[in-house]
Image (spheres, rainbow, N blue to C red):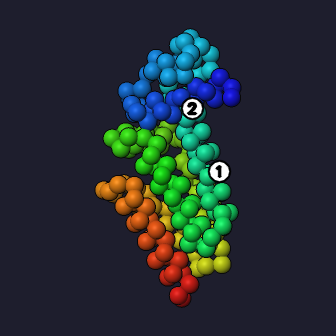
Amino acid sequence: MSKRDAIVTAAVEVFARHGFRQTSMDLIAQAAGVSRPALYQYFRNKQDVFTAVAEYVTDQLVEAAHRASQAEGSLADRVYGVLLVKLDTATGIADARHRRELIAQAVAMGVAPADDQLVYVLAQLLAGTPEPLETASVLLASAVGIGQSEGGPEVLRRRLRRLVDLTVTGLFAQ
């Protein structure tokens, strides 16, 4: 792993723990085990680090979604697997109190979210059903909503599974 990649990996945890506003270049350097001047050899400022972190997380999320879409199991199992990647990432990557701040910061900085790519993965799975792209968009938006609702991980996963089962059953009942 390159030094830059090690810094980005360490920064994921720092942003998750402290949010964007409270994260400093000092905290990032400390977590990455580098000096602050060394950190500036790779990144101009905190925004650059944040952009690299967002790209890294997006790449990891999309790769995991592709693997889930190609896994063994029924269509409902594979759709659930793709959406579970999103749910687990959304609920697990950052402390709940910082999640909205980090998402808002990414949007404000124009960092492209993974959602468009996830919709595409889901739409490929749903090819042959009525309006696969729209259905994929609705499912992803619903998964995000589930992730923002109250309840522990098992409750949220159960809700997500129910959503997928109802949707897939409904698609084939037409």
Residue at image coords 45%, 32%:
15
Q: Is residue 105 above or below residue 89?
A: above
Taking the image as shown, residue 132 lies to the left or right of residue 108, namely right
N-terminal label among 1 and 2: 2
In-front residue for pair 97/40: 97
Q: Which residue is mark 1?
A: 63
Q: Residue at the location (59% across, 39% down)?
A: 55
Up-down: is 147 above or below 31? below
Mark 2 closeness class: few <14, some 14–19, many ≥20 residues within 10 Å: some
Q: Name the residue rendered at 57%, 32% in the picture.
A: 9
In front here: 22 or 88? 88
Q: Amino acid at mark 1?
A: Glu
Q: Is residue 40 visible?
A: no
User: Taking the image as drawn, is residue 166 in sight?
Assistant: yes
Coordinates of residue 129 in the picture (x, y in percent): 61, 79
Q: Label 2: which residue?
A: 9
In the image, 128: left or right of 49?
right
| Viewport quadrant of the N terminus | top right
The secondary structure type at the circle numbered 2 is helix
